[in-house]
Amino acid sequence: MTTQDRETPNERATETREQLIRAGLVLFSRQGLEGVRTRQLAEEAGVNQSAIPYHFGGKEGVYAAVLERTAESIAGRLGLPRLSVTSAAAAEEALRKLMQDFVSALLDSDTSAAHSLLLVREQLQPTGSFDRIYLLLFRPLHETVTRLVAVLRGEQPEVDENILRAHAILGQAIAFAVAREALHRRLGHTVLSRDVVTRIAGLVGTMAVASAKA
């Protein structure tokens, strides 16, 4: 009896869904929603094409599941929502650490790279799934950075200036994900080593604090 024969129907269904989500992350991050064919997705996942409508209702359902998994994964790594701080010293350290963690979540593995590319695609061409990942990741992350900026500046968080500064600070991390290929060529590397990612994280953390206080 094979392992597959011993699996229950629920276990097989769960594994099929996971295979499609993993395949979807690879394909959608490279080609976007419109660029991926249903047959291509099934072949990448190693499942029957009929599994896509059965488990997800269609290609769009797989895409939505991949996006949600991506947002949950990054939010989990960042520990969002993070507790508020009230002192400038605590806010400075919290902002530095948050941005270092965000850089790592975007850069430190092939999966991280696929996550960041997928999220950038969704920002540039939002689909019906954007609202969900906005609530899961973008909003709590943006609000956290805005609060920390406000503490450092001695102002109220919901001031346009602080929201804009928070957006610029987050962009410092995202730029390394978006322009990854150019960075590879400038450094003469084909991949970003753990040491380079750590250095980028430290740099972005320092720049974030400076940008907040400027």
Image: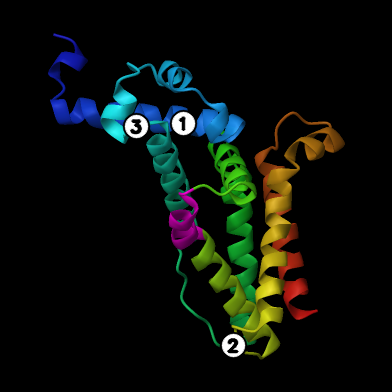
In percent of width and height, residue 138 lies at 53, 61
Crowding near pointer 3: few (<14 within 10 Å), some, many (20+)? some
Disc assigned to residue 24:
1
In percent of width and height, residue 74 lies at 49, 52
Q: Nearer the viewer, mark 1 or mark 2?
A: 1
Location of residue 89 by image quarter: bottom right
Task: Say which residue appears at 58% left-offset and 57% top-offset.
Answer: 101
- Label 2 amino acid? Ser
- Residue reaching furthest to the top: 1
Say which element carries label 2: loop
Could you tell me if residue 159 is visible in this image? yes
- Residue reaching furthest to the right: 186
N-term-proximal mark, 1 vs 2: 1
Q: Are marks 3 and 1 in contact (CB under 8 Å)?
A: no
Residue 133 magenta-highlighted = yes
Say which element carries label 1: helix
Q: Is residue 91 above or below residue 107?
A: below
- Label 3 amino acid? Glu
Report how far apart the C-alphas of labels 2 and 3 lie in the structure: 43 Å
Report how far apart the C-alphas of labels 1 and 2 lie in the structure: 43 Å
Q: Nearer the viewer, mark 3 or mark 1?
A: 1
Q: Is residue 56 above or below residue 135?
A: above
Task: Say which residue appears at 69% left-offset and 55% top-offset.
Answer: 173
Say which element carries label 3: helix
Can you identify the residue that label 3 sits on? 18
Residues drawn in magenta: 128-137
Q: Nearer the viewer, residue 128 or 47?
A: 128
Q: Nearer the viewer, residue 129 or 164?
A: 129
Residue 116 magenta-highlighted = no
Location of residue 116 by image quarter: top right
Disc assigned to residue 87:
2
Classify residue 208 as left or right of residue 122. Answer: right
